[in-house]
């Protein structure tokens, strides 16, 4: 195959743009997963029938005689899965068109002898040197217009029409070689999608995407209000495409277009795999960035995958239970089902400002926290560090001598415990009556114009999450554009953009008896990032029976209710007679004195509440506790400070996982006798030391 063949380029260009069009309109984003050819219902199920533990292994970096010893040591710590291949393009295709996949097949078959299943990574994160030399166009161009060189990774262009067929060809070859290997359970596409490209093909695709979305430049000029600063475009090619801070309307659309580029880049490989592989082999990808990264829309990426995966790293310091737990919940929400942690740190990383070791027991606590939030697979990065390369200082399980490092014993314990817990945990998942809504376009627009340097959207979400999590074993974090009927209480902390579809869904939720809580900045903008012509919450103002008169970035705290607001405060007015003031500012900045900070209104059996300020944790706890009570959400049993309660249900079983994230021992009184899965026996109370974990099954006294 010659990627320079111009007829093929034409076909690829059409495919590129065609896939991008799936994302053309926010309302046109498909809600259901696209079923790839050859996929069946069986695909992507096996990984939920047991818990998987393993690591990333790079057999191409070691003599083949060594592989058996690696696999033996993996099996000895309880590993039952390994991920291989994701950076090994130069070993799979050492020169153009000369493939060597035999070593991969041999590694897969050898792993089978040790009862270790294999996830195959496609190597498109690291194009080989012969390729970047011969086809320099595959190297991406950054937002400043500079083309990247060889020697690192992520230097490829997701949009370049040469790179798509080259990627498709290697992945097809891999799928032909491995798609029917019984020991291969699934595939990971690429690795930690990150950087888009600003090359000529990407720019041409952008212009075509805009033409398709808007039809005429008049419509585009109108949506972006280009009369402002004389931006009016009279030719499509005048529209910029770069990373400069430009018109927010343009920047929002650019995010959607780039999301579409990633979706198409990924779909190209999914189709190659599905054309040859057994339907039972799952397809996922590992999204990085501590879960909250938002360069592109993660919901869109996950629609074509069987399940979501992410890479859970702490970096400097120690596990932050709420932030990390919420990241797991966010990832579970990408597909609304259990997920895998495709990479987790074995003690420490190499890229943080201080790449410190976790405390003894904390590596184990991290694994159990992931499982408690819905992970069914956990893989360490990495098994053994290469003897050279950019990551020789990273935490690993084996040392340069090929023998276990101190963390190995903790990994052995995790393996033993996961094997013990598999029979009760397989088929269970976190289930919650409460959801927090998350929306990438809203995140982007607040990022574009934050208005206060300390306005941290994830922090705002966590302000709501923490008291909800304290009350419940499980909290969902889901897409603002999805179904809400299973929830009693829904919180939208940062929903700055409200589309007509979202407005209809949220209104229907309230009218059907749910309680909706909106946070500050809600409903300020439309899908094009335009200010709504109605005051906040824009299209939901009528349902609320009230509106925001003015928002204020705070340079000093203001009194609100029995507490304090910081960073942000909005002045609210009730407009309907039955809309009540829930919170009032005290003596504040003059503008806010005595005015409403939060409104609430009963609508049939439902309720809508608007909270216009960023309030302190005590006040938030009162607000959330009242909301849970009002919405009829039963609290789970109480646990002491530092102890996290997580729950999973399914297959008629109800599982409780407890972790003591603190340094002092804690005793937890259980509300009923439970079976202790890790230690055996039944318990009415458990004592957890620092980083202690208990896995318990309810219902054993019945
Ligand atoms: C990322 C990558 C891995 C490795 C780790 C190191 O998650 O996917 O290849 O570089 O970081 O922490």
Image (cartoon, rainbow, N blue to C red):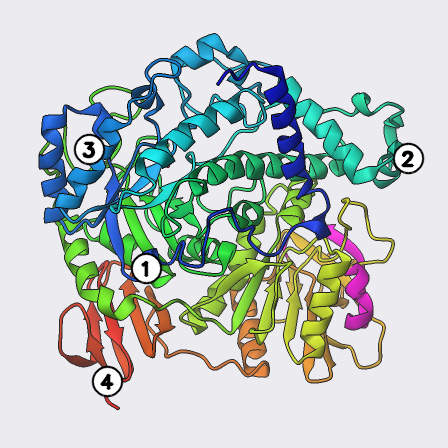
Question: Callout 3: 10 Å neighbours few (<14), some, many (20+)?
Answer: few
Question: Callout 4: 10 Å neighbours few (<14), some, many (20+)?
Answer: few
Task: Specify the segment rendered in magenta.
Answer: 537-557
Left or right for 506, reference 548? left
The magenta stretch spans residue 526: no
User: Under tag 1, what secondary structure?
Assistant: helix
- Is the residue indicated by label 4 positioned so its CB lies within 8 Å of ligand 1? no
Q: Residue 685 appears in which quarter of the rendering?
A: bottom left
> Distance between the Cα atoms at labels 2 and 4?
68 Å
Toward the top, the furthest residue is: 133
The magenta stretch spans residue 553: yes
Residue at point 57%, 36% (across, down):
264
Mark 3 lies on residue: 106
Comparing marks 2 and 1, which lies closer to the viewer?
2
Image mark for residue 700: 4
Question: Callout 1: 10 Å neighbours few (<14), some, many (20+)?
Answer: many
User: Under tag 4, what secondary structure?
Assistant: loop
> Distance between the Cα atoms at labels 1 and 4?
22 Å
Mark 1 lies on residue: 371
Comparing marks 2 and 4, which lies closer to the viewer?
2
Q: For residue 451, say whether it is visible.
A: yes
> Distance between the Cα atoms at labels 2 and 1?
52 Å
> Distance between the Cα atoms at labels 3 and 1?
31 Å
Image mark for residue 218: 2
């Amino acid at each position: 195959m010659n990627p320079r063949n111009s007829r093929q380029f034409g076909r690829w260009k059409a495919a590129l743009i065609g896939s991008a069009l799936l994302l053309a309109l926010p309302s046109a984003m498909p809600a259901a997963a696209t079923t790839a050819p050859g996929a069946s219902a069986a695909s992507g199920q096996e990984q939920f029938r047991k818990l998987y533990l393993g690591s990333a292994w790079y057999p191409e970096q070691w003599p083949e005689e060594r592989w058996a010893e690696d696999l033996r040591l993996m099996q000895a710590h309880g590993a039952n899965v390994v991920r291989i291949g994701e950076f090994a393009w130069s070993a799979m295709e050492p020169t153009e068109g000369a493939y060597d996949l035999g070593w991969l097949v041999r590694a897969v078959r050898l792993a089978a002898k040790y009862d270790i299943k294999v996830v195959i990574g496609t190597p498109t994160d690291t194009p080989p040197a012969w390729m970047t030399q011969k086809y320099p166009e595959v190297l991406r161009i950054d937002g400043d217009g500079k083309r990247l060189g060889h020697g690192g990774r992520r230097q490829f262009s997701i949009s370049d029409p040469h790179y798509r067929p080259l990627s498709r060809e290697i992945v097809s070859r891999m799928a032909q070689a491995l798609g029917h290997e019984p020991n291969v359970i699934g595939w990971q596409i690429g690795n930690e999608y990150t950087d888009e490209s600003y090359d000529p093909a990407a720019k041409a695709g952008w212009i075509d995407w805009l033409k398709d979305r808007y039809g005429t430049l008049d419509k585009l000029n109108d949506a972006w209000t280009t009369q402002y600063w004389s931006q009016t475009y009279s030719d499509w090619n005048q529209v910029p495409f770069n990373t400069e801070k430009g018109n927010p309307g343009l920047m929002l659309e650019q995010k959607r277009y780039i999301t579409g580029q990633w979706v198409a880049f990924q779909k190209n490989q999914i189709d190659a795999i599905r054309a040859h592989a057994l339907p039972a082999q799952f397809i996922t990808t590992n999204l990085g960035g501590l879960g909250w990264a938002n360069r592109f829309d993660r919901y869109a990426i996950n629609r074509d995958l069987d399940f979501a995966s992410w890479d859970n790293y702490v970096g400097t310091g120690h596990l932050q239970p709420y932030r990390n737990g919420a990241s797991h919940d966010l990832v579970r929400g990408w597909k609304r089902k259990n997920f895998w942690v495709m990479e987790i740190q074995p003690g420490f990383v190499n890229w943080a400002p201080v790449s410190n070791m976790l405390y003894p027991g904390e590596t184990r606590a991290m694994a159990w926290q992931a499982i408690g939030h819905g992970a069914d697979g956990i893989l360490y990065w990495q098994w053994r560090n290469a003897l050279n390369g950019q990551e020789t200082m990273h935490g690993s399980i084996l040392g340069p001598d090929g023998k276990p490092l101190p963390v190995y014993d903790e990994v052995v314990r995790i393996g033993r415990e996961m094997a013990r817990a598999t029979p009760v945990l397989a088929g269970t998942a976190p289930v919650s009556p409460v959801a927090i809504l998350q929306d990438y376009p809203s995140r982007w627009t607040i990022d574009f114009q934050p208005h206060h340097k300390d306005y941290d959207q994830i922090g705002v979400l966590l302000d709501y999450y923490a008291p909800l999590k304290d009350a419940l074993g499980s909290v969902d974090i889901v897409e603002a554009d999805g179904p809400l009927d299973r929830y009693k209480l829904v919180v939208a902390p940062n929903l700055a953009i409200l589309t007509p579809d979202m407005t209809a869904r949220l209104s229907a939720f309230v009218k059907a008896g749910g309680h909706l809580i909106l946070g500050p900045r809600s409903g300020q903008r439309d899908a094009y990032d335009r200010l709504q012509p109605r005051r906040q919450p824009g299209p939901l103002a009528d349902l609320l029976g009230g509106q925001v008169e003015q928002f204020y970035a705070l340079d000093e705290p203001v009194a609100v209710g029995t507490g304090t607001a910081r960073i942000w405060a909005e002045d609210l007015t009730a407009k309907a007679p039955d809309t009540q003031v829930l919170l009032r500012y005290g003596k504040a900045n003059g503008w806010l004195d005595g005015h409403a900070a939060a409104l609430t209104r009963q609508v049939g059996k439902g309720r809508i509440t608007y909270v216009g300020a960023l309030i302190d944790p005590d006040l938030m706890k009162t607000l959330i506790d009242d909301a849970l009570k009002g919405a009829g959400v039963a609290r789970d049993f109480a646990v002491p400070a530092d102890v996290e309660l997580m729950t999973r249900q399914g297959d008629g079983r109800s599982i409780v996982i407890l972790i003591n994230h603190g340094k002092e021992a804690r005793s937890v009184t259980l509300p009923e006798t439970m079976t202790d899965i890790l230690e055996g026996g039944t318990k009415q109370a458990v004592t957890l030391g620092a980083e202690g974990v208990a896995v318990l099954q309810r219902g054993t006294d019945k």
